[in-house]
Amino acid sequence: KAGVTQTPRYLIKTRGQQVTLSCSPISGHRSVSWYQQTPGQGLQFLFEYFSETQRNKGNFPGRFSGRQFSNSRSEMNVSTLELGDSALYLCASSPTTSRETQYFGPGTRLLVL
Amino acid sequence: GNSVTQMEGPVTLSEEAFLTINCTYTATGYPSLFWYVQYPGEGLQLLLKATKADDKGSNKGFEATYRKETTSFHLEKGSVQVSDSAVYFCALSSTGNQFYFGTGTSLTVIP
């Protein structure tokens, strides 16, 4: 089975722009979670989607949003980028039968200049 | 609230040395506990997990025991290899599938 894929792998944007990141979960997985990883804050939970519905949300401003499509693929959008948004954004998928086991993608590294 | 605290790194060991990475947690209810590993340039991989008190998770020579009385889940390996060099994350999952991660401990094993 193919693993979790994320596109693009690297991205450079400037302050004020917006960005959309994509995540394709493992086939058959319906739960997708997003995390922000930075050296200072570590891994922080952004949100989780299951069957196209946001099920959990972390403590991030409204500039961070996401959605999930009927094929379980998910996108994350960040509007009005700030320098502090520079991070590795990780996506993880979980099988319906074992929601606690998360499989992570390689991440998208975003640099905001 | 829920949180995970793990020992600061970086940790540098010689090959075949004994490894311990400490992890303690604060949680409401009865969380599941995990260790994830991140190799350079890759995403996180599940290393082991334990879902209830006194459970021992093990994989690839690594072990961790869920200790409710000390709220700990320390990672151990009897003899590390160069290929174990990576960043290790302790995590807990609360009700509702929300994960909380520690800040990670970088391990370098030298030959």
Image (cartoon, coloured by chain):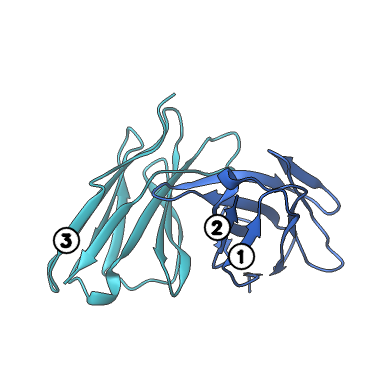
| Residue B48 sits in quarter | top right
Among the 4 quarters of the image, the one containing residue B74: bottom right
Q: Colour of chain B?
A: blue
Check disc 2 and give the amino acid type: Gln
Q: Nearer the viewer, residue B66 or B94?
A: B66
> How far apart are the two marked residues, 3 and 2, measured between alpha carbons?
29 Å
Dot 1 alpha-carbon crowd within 10 angstroms: few under 14, some 14 to 19, many 20 or more = some
Query: Is A45 drawn above or below residue A69 in the view shown?
Result: below
The residue lying at 40 percent from left, 43 percent from top is A105
Residue marked by disc 2: B98
On the rendered structure, is B59 left or right of A84?
A: right
Q: Residue at x 26, y 69 (%)?
A: A63
Query: Which of pointers 2 and 1 indicates the residue nearer the eye?
Result: 1
**Nearest to the observer: residue A68 or residue B44:** B44
Mark number for residue B48? none
Badge 2 and badge 1 both on one subunit: yes
- Residue type beneath disc 3: Ile
Element marked by disc 3: strand
User: In this rendering, do the residues under marks 1 and 3 share a single chain?
Assistant: no
Q: Colour of chain A?
A: cyan
Label annotation for residue A12 = 3
Read off the chain for label 3.
Answer: A
Callout 3 and callout 2 share a chain: no
Which element type, helix, strand or loop, lies under badge 1?
Answer: strand
Label of residue B11 in the image: 1
